[in-house]
Image: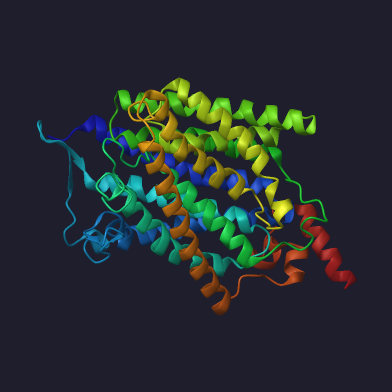
Amino acid sequence: MLDTGVTAWMLVSASLVLLMTPGLAFFYGGMVRGKSVLNMMMMSFGAIAVVGVIYVLWGWSMSYGSSVGGIFGNPFDQFGLGGSFDPVTVLNEDTGAFMPTIVDVGFQATFAIITVALVSGAIADRVKFGSWMVFAAVWVTLSYFPLAHMVWGGGLLSDEGPFVFGDAAPIDFAGGTVVHINAGVAALVLALVVGKRKGFGTEPMRPHNLPFVMLGAALLWFGWFGFNGGSAYGADEAAGLAWVNTTTATAAAILGWLLTEKIRDGHATSLGAASGVVAGLVAITPAAGDVSPLGAIVVGAVAGALSALAVGLKYRFGYDDSLDVVGVHLVAGLWGTVALGFLATETGLFYGGGLAQLGVQVVIALVAIAFSAVVTLVVALAVKATLGWRVTEESEVGGIDLAVHGETAYETIAQGSVIKEVRA
C-alpha cells in the first residue's frame, strides 16, 4: 500500500532542500565583492547542473548500492537507476506501507548538490569556472558518495559498522559528517591549494550586498526544514521534533553569534545574524532527531559563539577561506556531531549514557575529517596540475564576472571596466 502522506512529505522536503542551493547562491553572492557576484552564484548553479546528472548515473548506486568494503557502493550495481534498483522503499514491514524509491533518489540528490555548492565559498573571486565544474564532478564521486554510503548506506560509519559500543551507535540524523564536516574540510584543503586572493589581509573585501546575504540565510533556513524534517522519513512526531529543534537551535545561534560580536567588536551586525542562522542550522543537522528542544538551545547557542570566534582564524593562520566555510560549516558541524555525545536523550553523557556515545561521535568525526582531507587534496592537486585553478591576475583584479562569464551584475562595474580598457 502506497503511503501517500509520507510520499508527499518527502517530495515537499526534496523541493525545500533543492531551494537551499539557490538560497546559498544569494548568501554567498552577497558576501563577495560586486565584481564577483555572478561567478559566485554560478558556482552554486553549476553544482546543481553537474551533480543533478551524476547522481542519477552513479551517485545513488555509490551511496546505496551493494557495499564495497563498507566504503562505497558499487557504481555499476544500480547505474542509471537500473540493475538491482528496487522501485519500492518499504516503510513499514508490518503493514506493507511503502513509497516509491525514486522519491528518495530525488531527496538524496539535493543533499549531494548543496554539499558541493557549500565548498565553493572557500575559493571565491579567483578560480576558473571550468576547473570548478570538473572538481565538483570528481569530488562528489570520490568524497561525498562514499561518505554517504559509510554513514547512511550501511557502511563503516553507520549503526551497522564497527563503531558500535553497546547501546552507542553513530548518530548523524541529517548530515553532520556527510555534509558539513565533509564540505568544511574540503573548503580548508581547497583554500590552501588554490592560495589567497590578491590583496587578502591588506585590502578591504567587504560583502557588497548584505540584503542578499540575509535573503540567502532566510531561504536556507526555510529549505532546512526539508533537510532535517525530511530526514525523519515520515510526517510524524520525529519530523515535528526535528522542525522544532531546527528552529530553536537556529534562533539560539543567532543570539550566541550576536552576543559574541557585541562583546568583541561593540556591534551586533546583520552579517553576524545571517551567519548565526547558518551556524545554528549546521550544528543541529546531525542532532535534530536525537536531542530535546532544551538540548537544541545549547547546541545552537554554543555553535553561534564558536563560529563567531572561528571565522577570524583565517587571518591568524593565513588561509583565505573567502566566505568562512571552515569557520561555520566545519566548526559548527564538528560541534553538532560531538555534542550528541553529551546531549543525545537516549545515550548521551548528560542523560546517564556514559562516555560511549561521546567516544563514538568523536571517532566518526575524525574519520570523516581524515577521509575528506585526503580525497580533496588528491583531487585539488590533480585539477591544479592539469587544468590549473587560478584565473589571471588581470581577471581577478578587473572582475571575474566580466572576464569569465562576459557579464556584470551592475552597470557601474561594466562602465568602470570599459574606462580601464580605454585608458589602457
- Does the image show residue 226? no
Query: Does 177 appear above or below 133?
Result: above
Viewer-proximal residue, 141 or 100?
A: 141
Residue reaching furthest front?
354
Residue shown at 59% from the left, 43% from the top? 328
Quadrant housing residue 240: top left
Describe residue 175's horizontal placement relative to residue 273 as left or right.
left
Q: Where's residue 6, x and y in %? A: 25, 32
Q: Where's residue 153, x and y in %? A: 28, 51
Residue shown at 63% from the left, 63% from the top? 192
Viewer-proximal residue, 102 or 408?
A: 102
Position of the N terminus by quadrant: top left
Chosen colour scheme: rainbow
Residue reaching furthest bottom?
386
Q: Where's residue 306, x and y in %? A: 61, 37
Viewer-proximal residue, 356 or 252?
A: 356
Describe residue 420's horizontal placement relative to residue 339 as left or right.
right
Query: Does 203 appear above or below 333?
Result: below
- Does the image show residue 158? yes
Quadrant housing residue 261: top right
Describe residue 381's horizontal placement relative to residue 59 as left or right.
right
Query: Does 10 appear above or below 387?
Result: above
Position of the C terminus by quadrant: bottom right
Viewer-proximal residue, 154 or 179?
A: 154
Residue reaching furthest right?
423
Q: How many marks?
A: 0
Residue shown at 17% from the left, 52% from the top? 86
Q: Where's residue 267, x and y in %? A: 77, 30
